[in-house]
Image (spheres, helix red, strand yellow):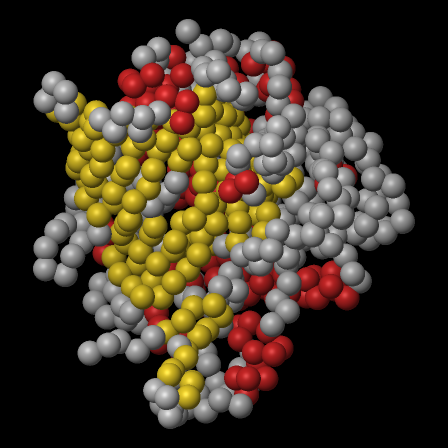
Amino acid sequence: MPLHTHHAHRRSSLNSNRSSTDDMKPDSAGGVEDDATIVEPDQGNVLSHIISQLRPGADLSRVTLPTFILEPRSMLERITNFMAHPETLLPMPQIDDPVKRFVAVVKFYLSGWHIKPPGVKKPLNPILGETFTCYWEYPDHTRGYYIAEQTSHHPPKSSYFFMAPDHGIRVDGTLKPRSKFLGNSAASMMEGISYLRFLNRGKSRGGEKYILTQPNMYARGILFGKMKYELGDHSYVRCPENNLTADIEFKTKGYFSGTYNAMGGVIKNEKTGEVLYELSGMWNGEMHIKNLVTGHKELLFNATNAKHTPPQTRRLEEQADRESQKLWRSTVLAVNARDHEKATDEKTKIEDRQREEAAKRAEEGIDWTPKLFRRVRAGPGESEEGEADLDWILNATIDGKDPKTMTEQILAITPILPGQKVDSAFDIPPHTPNATPNHNNNLQPEQNAAAPPSGDGNDLIDFGDSASNAKVVTANQNISSQHRARSVSLMDDDRHINAMNDKMGNMNLMGPMQASGNPSTGEHQPLERTDTETSEVDSFFDAEG
C-alpha cells in the first residue's frame, strides 16, 4: 500500500495553469491513418520553404523551419508524455514478482507514445537555460513532480527529473535529439537515456533501476505526398539487477508492404537467454503480450481511446521569463491561431535574442552552467557510478526518509506548485561580476570546477559551484538572494554564423546545386546546411540510381 504525505501543504489546483496539451485535439484513434496525415492548406513543400529563404549573402540565422509544422509547446514539456498515464505508472513498485513488475514497466513505457497533436508536428526547441516545472494530482491524493532544464544547446540536451514521493518512483533522464534529412523524410534521432527507479525495491543504491531508451521519430513526405509521422527502430527497457530486457521495435512502413504504427518485441532473461514474452500490436492502438511458456495472449494496453492526464503548472504571472510556457507564449498563441507570419516573427525574436546574449557572454568571457542540474559523477564509487551517458542530473539531494520530507526537498529546489515564487535573480540574474553567491543547502556543490568540457561539442564549461546558479523561494519561505559571482547569460553561442554567411555570399544560389569535391577523382562532398535552432549540420547526398 502506498504511503501518503501529510496534506496540510496542499493547495487547490484551481490556481494552476492548464498544460499546453489541453489545447490539443483528442488523441488519434488507433490505426486511423488520416489523423496522422493531416495537411494544412498552406503546408506545401517544407524544403521549398527553406530554400526560398536562401539568397546570395543571406543571413543563415534567419533560415527557419516553417511554423505550420510546430507543436505549440516546448520539448521540455513534451517529455511529460512519458508520465501522463498514472494508471500504468503508480502501481509498478507494489508488484512483488520481479518478472510481473518488469512487464508492468514495459506497459508503462508503451502507454505514452500515442499522445501527440494531429498531423506531423515538431515541438519548439528549448533555448539554453529554459526551464519547465509541473505536477500531477493523483486520484489517491498524492502528487508527482517534474523539473526540466535545457542543459546544452550545441548539441541540444534536455535534462529532466520526475518523482512521485508517496509511491517511491523516481526518473532521471537526458534527451539528446539529433536531426537528419533522408530524402523525402526528416528524422529526429532520439538519443539519450532515462533511469527509472523504485525506491522500495532492489539492493543497489538508489533502488531498483530500469534503463530506458527511445525510438526515433520520422516525418515522411516532406518533399512530395502527404506528410506522415512515424516512430521507428529499436528501443530497450533493461533491469540489470533482475537480468531482464525488453527489445521493442517500432516498425516503419515499407514501400510495398507493412502498415503504419506497428510495434513488436520480446522480453527475455539476459542471463539464461530465455525469451519469456512476445509483444505485438499498434503503438497508437491495441498492444498485446503473449506468454511463451503458457501460450496465453492478452491485451497489454489499448491506446485507441486512452485518455492521458496532462500535468498542471503555475499560472503564467507566477512564472519566470525563461520558463517554457511564458517564454513561448506569444509564439504558441500565433501557432494556435494559424498566424504563421506572426508565429515566425515571435519565434525569431527569441532566437535573435539568444544569439545576441551569447555574443555578449563570449565577449565578456563568461562561462555558463545550468541552474538546476549538474554534471553526473560517474566514476567508481561516485554518486552516479556507471551513468555517464546521463550527462546531467538534478543538482539537489533527495534523500528524505519519508514521502513528506522528500516532497519538502523537491519543493525547495525551484517553484512547482501554485503560490511558489521566485526572486528577481532566479531566472535572469543581474550583472554583478564581483558579488558573492548565495547557496541553498539542499543543492549539491559542483565538483571539479576547473574541469574542461566533455568534448562532445558542448559549449558548457563549469566554472564553480553551480549551486550558486539556483536560487529559489518556496511557498513558505523567502531565501534572501545575493548577486552571483559572475553574471551568466541564458543564451547559447552561434559562433559559426558569420563565417557561414561569408561563404554563402560567394555561392551562386540561383544556379543549379552542385556538390563540392575533386572532379578529377570523382570524389564529392555532400551539400550541407545548418539548422537555425539546433545548429545541427545536415548533409544532402545525391540519390544513387
Total labels drawn: 0
- Residue 331 lies, in percent from the top left, at 50, 57
Q: Residue furthest front?
A: 272
In the displayed structure image, the side of residue 91 where residue 299 appears, left or right: left
Above or below for 54 versus 86 = below
Q: Is residue 337 visible?
A: no
Quadrant occupied by the N terminus: top left
In the displayed structure image, the side of residue 123 where residue 419 appears, left or right: right
Q: Is residue 245 visible?
A: yes
Q: Residue at x 45, y 21 (%)?
A: 208
In the displayed structure image, the side of residue 163 where residue 491 appears, left or right: right
In the displayed structure image, the side of residue 239 where residue 249 appears, left or right: left
Q: Residue at x 47, y 54 (%)?
A: 124
Q: Residue at x 82, y 35 (%)?
A: 438
Give residue 106's quadrant in the image: top left
- Residue 445 lies, in percent from the top left, at 74, 34
Q: Residue furthest right?
A: 434
Quadrant occupied by the C terminus: bottom left
Above or below for 443 versus 337 = above
Q: Residue at x 22, y 33 (%)?
A: 266
Above or below for 505 versus 399 = below
Q: Residue furthest top?
A: 1
- Residue 66 lies, in percent from the top left, at 41, 66
- Residue 308 lies, in percent from the top left, at 34, 32
